[in-house]
Image (spheres, helix red, strand yellow):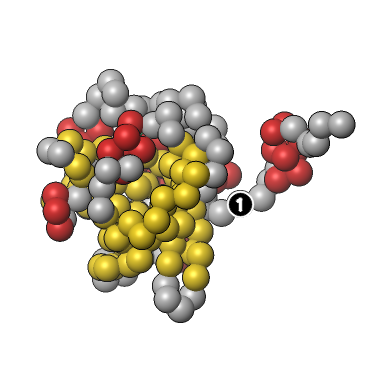
Amino acid sequence: MSGPSTADLDTWLEGVDYPVFVVTVHHGGRSDGCLVGFATQASINPPRLLVCLSTANRTYELARQAETLAVHLLDAGHRDLAELFGGTTGDQIDKFSRCRWEPGPQGLPLLSDSAGWMIGTVLTQVPLGDHVGFLLAPVQISNRPRTDTRRVLTYQQARTIAPGHPA
Ligand SMILES: Cc1cc2nc3c(=O)[nH]c(=O)nc-3n(C[C@H](O)[C@H](O)[C@H](O)COP(=O)(O)O)c2cc1C
């Protein structure tokens, strides 16, 4: 007997909401980043964040070789950034020619219009299925205050964006 399908799980989770993030990476002179909904704090002490990248994405190709990743929260007013990083692929366009950013440590692209970023060291990569989990130890966190903490862009606001890469 087969268990519940992906569609069954989608139905069970329908309407559930959570923040989405943009994860950026720089490795070997190349940069990319993608929208990520599969991300969560994974430990309080020590502080840890888990972000999950589809093995189909170009961002994963760079991230699997990188020592650090940057994780950005988005303001609800910046759905354009979610469309850019979630709806297009670095295989076809240079996303960083279409948004404001500045180079951070080790060349990591930091989005100027994010609602705050965290740079993390990759501690482990965990195969999870069609995604790989990157366990991050925070090394630097932006101190830019959010204009309105209730207005972080969420999955329900971004779910209509067609992913730039099939998962
Ligand atoms: C709402 C939403 C959530 C997404 N969540 C994830 C995710 O958790 N992990 C992931 O790897 N891709 C996720 N994606 C897909 C990537 O952001 C998308 O395929 C992107 O275009 C990949 O770009 P790249 O090929 O330049 O890495 C999501 C897309 C959307 C629209």
> Where, by quadrant of the figure, is residue 33 drawn?
top left
Pick whichever, 77 or 4, lies toward us.
4
Q: Residue at x 56, y 54 (%)?
A: 18
Q: Is residue 55 above or below residue 13?
A: above
32 relative position to 166: left or right: left
Q: Secondary structure at mark 1?
A: loop
Pick out the residue farthest to the right: 1
Asked whether residue 158 is in view, the answer is no
The answer to whether residue 30 is seen in the rendering is: yes
Q: Is residue 167 left or right of residue 81?
A: right
Label 1: few (<14), some (14–19) or many (≥20) C-alpha neighbours in 10 Å = few
| Lateral position of residue 1 relative to residue 25, left or right | right
Please name whichever residue, 142 or 167, is drawn nearer the observer in this view of the structure: 167
Task: Classify mark 1 as within 8 Å of ligand 1 or not, answering yes or no.
Answer: no
The N terminus sits in image quarter = top right
Outermost residue, top side = 92
Q: Which residue is mark 1?
A: 17
Residue 85 point in image, percent of width and height:
35, 37
Q: Residue at x 36, y 27 (%)?
A: 88
Task: Tell how many labels.
Answer: 1
Residue 143 appears at what percent x and percent y?
A: 26, 71
Identified at 66% across, 50% down, the residue is: 16
Q: Quadrant of residue 57?
A: top left
Task: Depth check: give the residue in front, 60 or 85.
Answer: 60
The structure residue drawn at horizontal position 34% and vertical position 27%, both measured from the top left corner, is: 89
- On the image, the x and y values in percent for residue 92 come to 28, 21
Residue 2 place in picture, x, y as percent: 82, 31
Residue 115 drawn above or below residue 57: below
Q: Quadrant of residue 159?
A: top right
Q: Amino acid at mark 1?
A: Asp
